[in-house]
Image (tube, grey):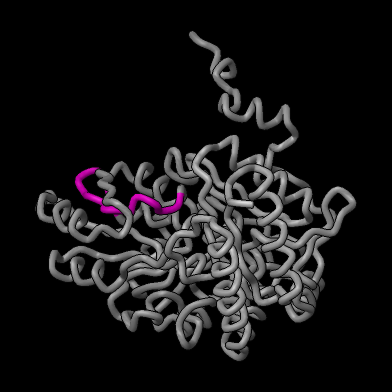
Amino acid sequence: MLDPFARCRLHDDFEPVTEMGAYPYYRAVRERLATGEVLVDGRVLVAAGSNDYLGLSTDPRLKDAACRAVRRLGTGTSGSRLVNGSLSLHEELEGRLAAFLGQEAAMVTPTGFLANLALGALVGPRDTVLADHLIHASLLDAVRLSRARLRRYRHNDLDHLARLLESGDPSGAGLILTEGMFSSTGTLGDLPGIAGLARRHGVRLALDGAHDIGLLGAGGRGAAEHFGLEDAVDLHTLAFSKCFGTTGGAVAGPGQIIVYLRHHARSMVFSAALSPASTAAALAALDIIETEPERRHRALVAAARLRADLSGLGFETGTSETTIIPVHVGDILLCCRLWRELFDEGVFATAMVPPSVPAGRALIRVSATALHTDAQLDRIVTAFAAAGRRLGLIGG
């Protein structure tokens, strides 16, 4: 038999990237500051690729809530939710989340990835899942584990989705998977069109709100509220690692479905329960999301300014209207070189290369947060201007 270890090597593109010191991943942060900055390699950099859109991960209220929970309940939960790991704190958070999202029930999971993976329990080999081409890897893994048939439609292409629905197998169940706010492009899922097709064809709609719940909508309830379509979504998933400033995730939907997932979703049944610290922090974050709308307003205003400035320099920034601004580069090597140039200029951004994005569409992901000051936004733009000119990405 062949040795599986012999195949374990990085993509060929990363060899020159590493040699030139532009490898952009696993950079250790020494300290995360409450000013929207991070300490890396002894330097203070502007955090320009963070998912912490509301700036809550360093908020004293979340840290105090987490510390109180640790003192009362310890650092772990000793087991899965099914057996001995459930806490009344989990149940409190689940009740609050269900009410917040206008759903009957919610199920808290250790990570957002595991929340999405739980959806695999809803479908099986005779069923069909229709998924946007840009959905997160966790959703793709959920479908693969379910052994359902996966049919992917082009990003937000309603005509393509309609054709796939019309050619579907009527003997099996159908489920549409999309995201409220896509993590690589910052674009919103075309929820009005997708929800209409779901109703017309009698299939269920599951919406991944990892990036938009807490940020979008008048009450911060995400893309569904933003479009006025909260009743059209059958199931929500969310991640606490974005707007909630901690770790963990949840699934929210009809009570019967949540009970089913509690007993049949392997990612729930066989995972240790969410830690007391993260659970308490998520509850504190929900309080802030509900009472301080100015945080999401500031993040969106900062993003609009940053997008306009970067576009004005000549960078291709796509059609996002959210806190995520994709700076399209295309080539992997050039993208990593731009990341390194930005790093040297004092900006800690995120390089996204395949398979996180389609082949030939490598990009620098920039995100604005509620903590970013106007001076920090200026620093980000100045860094892009200098780096982009050195690499010939924009005019001099």
Q: Position of residue 284 (x, y in %)?
A: 67, 80
Residue 240's quadrant in the figure? bottom right
- Which segment is the magenta one? 123-136
Quick check: 247 left or right of 151?
right
Q: From the viewer's perspective, tell me whether residue 170 is left or right of residue 51.
A: left
The answer to whether residue 9 shows anywhere in this view is yes
The dominant secondary structure in magenta is: loop
Q: Position of residue 162 (x, y in %)?
A: 16, 58
Determine the residue positioned at 75% across, 50% down: 343
Q: Nearer the viewer, residue 115 or 38?
A: 38
| Residue in the picture at 40% in, 62% down | 179
Residue 188 position, x and y percent, is 40, 67
Specify whether residue 356 is painted magenta: no
Q: Out of 249 and 132, give the one closest to the viewer.
A: 132
Tell me the residue at 30%/41% (across/down).
147
- Report x, y in % for residue 127: 21, 49
Q: Residue furthest front?
A: 396
Residue depicted at 59% across the width and 74% down the height: 305
Tell whether 354 sits left or right of 190: right
Q: Give the answer, above or below, for where 49 lies relative to 68.
A: above
Task: Quadrant for residue 296, please give it.
Answer: bottom right
Q: Is residue 130 magenta?
A: yes
Quadrant position of residue 382: bottom right
> Residue 268, can we see it?
no
The number of discs equals: 0
